[in-house]
Image (cartoon, grey):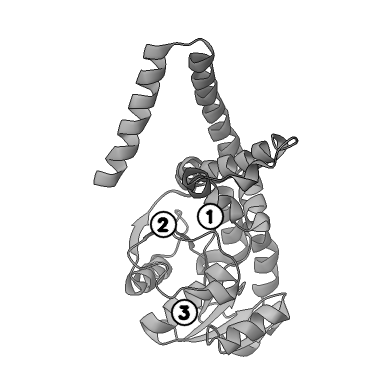
């Protein structure tokens, strides 16, 4: 099992992984981040033991695992830098919410050292100070191997996440992007868009003074890190745009049923959606 772990990106996700990893396997954790305050806070909180703002300094720590926990569009330039500063035996993985072509590009740069992964866990909070050591316990972790993935590398990452307490399963990188483009990226897009719509409707009266519980619950994820979600939307743009288009057609069906006073059609539309949502509580 890994003894020396380097986490690139000492924020909420990277910090939570560092805490979970240290508790699960008793490893040392070195942090790299462009923000020196994040590194200092991470050390003060015991999330990491040492840190640096210089990617190349990763060689000084001699890690046997590097975990990428930065916005997904930074992965490729980071990989280009670290490839010559880590050993050939060092495993590289990630916490990114987008896979697809990104996995194949990282394989081109890092070779068999890389295996993609995505923990299905998180909150709208950001910052290493919000790190949670139990964030991943009982949650799914998706491994996205390809035909080039080294079997031993994959098994090492699988074993690590199993020890952390996650439920590990495998998925093709492009299938992953379709699935999570719909069930994760689309809901975030809708929440951001709803906040924008309410702001535009607030010209005569400040509607944000009257948020009900439903509005707060629905828009909670719109408080997420804008840079992280910008990168997710752009990196998975094809699947996100397709999902938004289907959602817009569903919204148009609802609009037309309301506009036309179609009582039976509206009732059936709402009934089907309500029944499907309630079924999620059972499964």
User: Measured from the top left, where is residue 122 in percent x and y?
Assistant: 48, 61
Q: Which residue is mark 3?
A: 19
Q: Secondary structure at mark 1?
A: loop
Mark 3 vs mark 1, foreground winner is: 3
User: Measured from the top left, where is residue 245 in percent x and y?
Assistant: 57, 28
Q: Which residue is mark 2?
A: 142
- The quadrant holding residue 134 is bottom left
Residue plotted at (43% across, 57% down) = 120
* Mark 2 → mark 3, Cα distance in angstroms: 20 Å
* Mark 3 → mark 1, Cα distance in angstroms: 20 Å
Residue plotted at (55% across, 55% down) = 103
In depth, the one of 110 and 172 nearer the eye is 172
Neighbour tally class for label 2: few under 14, some 14-19, many 20 plus, Cα within 10 Å: many
Q: Quadrant of the N terminus?
A: bottom left
Q: Which residue is mark 1?
A: 97
Q: Label 3 near label 2: C-beta < 8 Å? A: no
Mark 2 vs mark 3, foreground winner is: 3
Residue 98 showing in the rendered view: no
Residue plotted at (48% across, 63% down) = 115
Point out the tag, 2 or 3, that comes first from the N-terminus.
Answer: 3
Q: Is residue 240 above or below residue 19?
A: above
């Amino acid at each position: 099992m890994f003894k020396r772990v380097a986490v690139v990106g000492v924020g909420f996700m990277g910090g939570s992984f560092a805490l979970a990893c240290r508790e699960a396997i008793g490893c040392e954790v070195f942090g790299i981040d462009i923000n020196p305050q994040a590194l200092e806070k991470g050390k003060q909180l015991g999330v990491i033991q040492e840190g640096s703002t210089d990617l190349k300094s990763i060689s000084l720590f001699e890690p046997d695992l590097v975990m990428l926990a930065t916005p997904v569009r930074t992965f490729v330039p980071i990989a280009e830098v670290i490839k010559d500063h880590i050993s050939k035996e060092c495993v590289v993985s990630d916490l990114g919410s987008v896979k697809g072509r990104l996995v194949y590009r990282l394989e081109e740069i890092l070779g068999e050292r890389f295996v993609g992964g995505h923990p299905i866990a998180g909150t709208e909070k950001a910052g290493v100070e919000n790190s949670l050591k139990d964030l991943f316990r009982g949650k799914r972790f998706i491994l996205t191997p390809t035909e080039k993935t080294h079997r031993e590398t994959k098994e090492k990452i699988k074993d690590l996440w199993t020890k952390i307490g996650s439920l590990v399963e495998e998925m093709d990188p492009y299938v992953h992007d379709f699935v999570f483009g719909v069930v994760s990226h689309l809901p975030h897009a809708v929440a951001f868009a709803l906040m924008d719509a309410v702001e535009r409707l607030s010209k005569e009266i400040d509607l944000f003074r009257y948020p009900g519980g439903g509005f707060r619950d629905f828009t909670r994820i719109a408080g997420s890190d804008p840079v992280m979600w910008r990168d997710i939307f752009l990196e998975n743009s094809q699947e996100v745009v397709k999902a938004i288009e289907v959602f817009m057609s569903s919204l148009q069906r609802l609009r037309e049923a309301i506009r036309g006073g179609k009582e039976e059609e509206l009732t059936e539309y709402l009934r089907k959606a309500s029944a499907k949502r309630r079924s999620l509580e059972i499964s």
